[in-house]
Amino acid sequence: MGLLSITLVGSLNAYGAEPDDQGRDIAAPAPAGDVAPAAPSTTPAAGTTTLGDMLVTGQLTGGTNPPPAYAGGQVASGGRIGVLGEQDAFNTPFSVISYTSQIIDNQQDDTVGSVLENDAGVQKAYGSGTAGEIFQIRGFPLYGQDISFGGLYGVLPRQIVQTNFVNRVELFKGANAFANGVSPGGSGVGGAVNLEPKWATDDPISRLKLGYASDSQFEQEVDVGRRFGKNQRFGVRLDAQHEKGDTALNDENAADTSVGLGLDYRGERARASAYFGYQRQHLKHFRSVIYTSNATEVPEPPDADTNYAPSYAQTELKTEFGLLRGSFDFTDHWTGYAAIGANHSREDSDYAGLLLQDDQGNAGAYRISVPYEANLFTGQAGFRGNFDTGPISHKINVGYSGYYRRMNTAYRQSSLAALQSTNIYDPAALPSPPTVVSGGDFDNPPIRNRHRADGWAISDTAGLFNDKLLLTVGARYQSLRIENYSAEGVFNEPAIVNHAVSPAYGVVVKPLDWLSLYANHIEALQAGDSAPTQSANFGQVVGIAESKQNEVGGKVDFGTIGGSLALYEIEQPSAYTDPVTNIYGYYGKQRNRGLEVSVFGKPTKRLRLMASASWIDPELSDTANGANDGNNAVGVADYRFVFQGDWQLPSLPNWSANARVIRSGTQYADAANTLKLAPWTRIDLGLRYKMPWGDNERHITWRANVTNVANSDYWASAQSGYLTQGDPRTFKLSATVDF
């Protein structure tokens, strides 16, 4: 069965190109080589409103122009679809939505996870004992290391990604092996996320932001961009941010520094771009997840600001990354492109694990210390073009993508037989316990695994009846090699080697100018999960997983408001630890069937809105001894609703208010479905004021936001069987000055 997804998309709407709060068009930049040249056309695209001549200033460049912002400016009319490049969502047989810098700024979203909470099909959680964000898309996990940057996997920090160097957050829903290839972390079966970096705009940018967040977090950000040279062919954009102080969680302290530098060149036929980034984060006494362990039911969550983690819990995360991209138009219809990227990450962490002992909140704490280092190199190349064969148009894509990753790590762990006693409602002051178990050289971590993936893709999108009917047929040949090593760095033979052809079929039918119906079949080939700490093969990557998706849907575009409806089914092998051998591996199957609905746009001159809903039926089969066959998969909420609105106050033209409501349904923390999490609701509110100053051509934007206004206590997620508590009420104040 398939899933119906209605996504409203389009180009310029009845209100024209939507400016951001700084008065600039927020069309996102794209690295060179994203879109093949198209033949000139004088016919307006379906679903658009023809306007008179208009001047658009401050357009973001960096190569070619991606799909423009949709009405209201909070989302774009399309996004990057892997090997297909930047596409208008109305013309593709896939579900894609892109969040622009406007909504990132107005909601004061510090991390990518906060941005993705705007979609009901995405659920945010934290890693197993770590401070890193992970996500569920259509009920399947997506790890931070599997988020692409400018279309390249493995470039970004793997735990938490700050948003200060991000211009767009693009969400692709569904299996995506054909579009994106194999991901480094082996996740992303339910969807993919791509971040587009900031590039220099046509208009100069000189921006300073000062911010404060509860309890005592102070932020400073500088954003400067210029274009220069003949026809402004060269561009440079520098963004630097620093935050430090206590958070809204009791006794938690966080500091981060992130810097991004974007350089680009745009010629008549040649384009090139480069991006270099650095991110360092240090979290002290951060609140970890809770393992359900011996609990027979899920306890009530403690107060939202309670920090039940031991005080020794801390992590320092450092990442240097970069990418280079270039493209050249061989003719007016054919373009070649190539890109390379690299990432070096170092993490030094003392994690605190909490194991629930009963239903009264009593828990046992243990410590695990982990140094982690990874180096990754990634690249892609290909060409795109278009031609006609009689009445049939063709868009051809041929491309290669691949990566190589080496990961080194070791660990030290305290005794699980002598846990420290605490309680999540009344946390004890716990000293750092001695470690009694270790693996690998802590001072010189040995290699634990290597990944090598290569993929070659080809596709043709054929258009008939003036592109009222679009047929996409494609395939990606993928090869994957995984080498696992023992804790001492000894190669565990043999290597895991696999290859497969992942096909993709899609059809788009546009019976009316405002309606696009579609269907697709796409698959996934992913490196397996790493075995958890309690398994006999801890740290090793287990096998290779192949998944399949069928989806049907529809997209509508009424110019100022759009939406989507999707119906899908995804099947993926599921992993668990064998109760007899204690070996973690792929033995079962998870099948998710779901329905998604979304609406967004600018229905009135003062109101911008986004709303979405998701229902999922996640069923397990082939479980250990058949004990949990037919049960719901762990950590998948059966429904989620998100409503977000931004309203310009009628009698106060420089004032705007925004609100977001998130409602999440029931989910289970165990495969037996005995540990049940209650549904929860969260409300976020915001207010901003654009204050003119100087020559009245400039202004200061004041923003005030409150997340979790009611300070609600709730378990946000049971991803992978552990509990992540929702964040407490947090106030954010900022002033952004344009010089």
Image (tube, grey):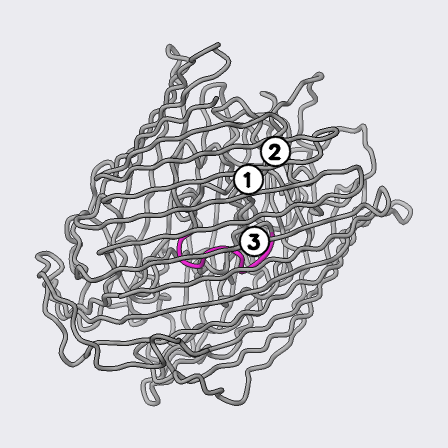
Per the model, the C-alpha gap separating discs 3 and 2 is 20 Å
Q: In front: 294, or 592?
A: 294
Q: Which residue is mark 1?
A: 198
Q: Amino acid at mark 2?
A: Leu
3 or 2: mark nearer the eye:
3
Secondary structure of the residue carrying tag 1 is loop
Count residues near mark 3 (Cα–Cα under 10 Å), then give few for <14, some for 14-19, many for 20+: many
Tell me if residue 152 is in the magenta stretch: yes
Apparent side of residue 235 relative to residue 382 in the rendered image (left or right):
left
Residue 330's place in the image compared with 398, above or below, is above
Can residue 617 be seen at all in this image of the molecule?
yes
Mark 1 vs 3, N-terminal side: 1
In percent of width and height, residue 625 lies at 36, 84
Residue found at x 40% / y 34%: 644
Task: Kindly identify the residue that appears in the image at 8 percent across and 61 percent down.
Answer: 428
Instruction: Specify few, some or many for label 1: CA neighbours under 10 Å numbering under 14, 14-19, or 20 or more.
Output: many
The span shown in magenta is 151-160
Per the image, is 482 magenta?
no
Mark 3 is on which residue type? Gly
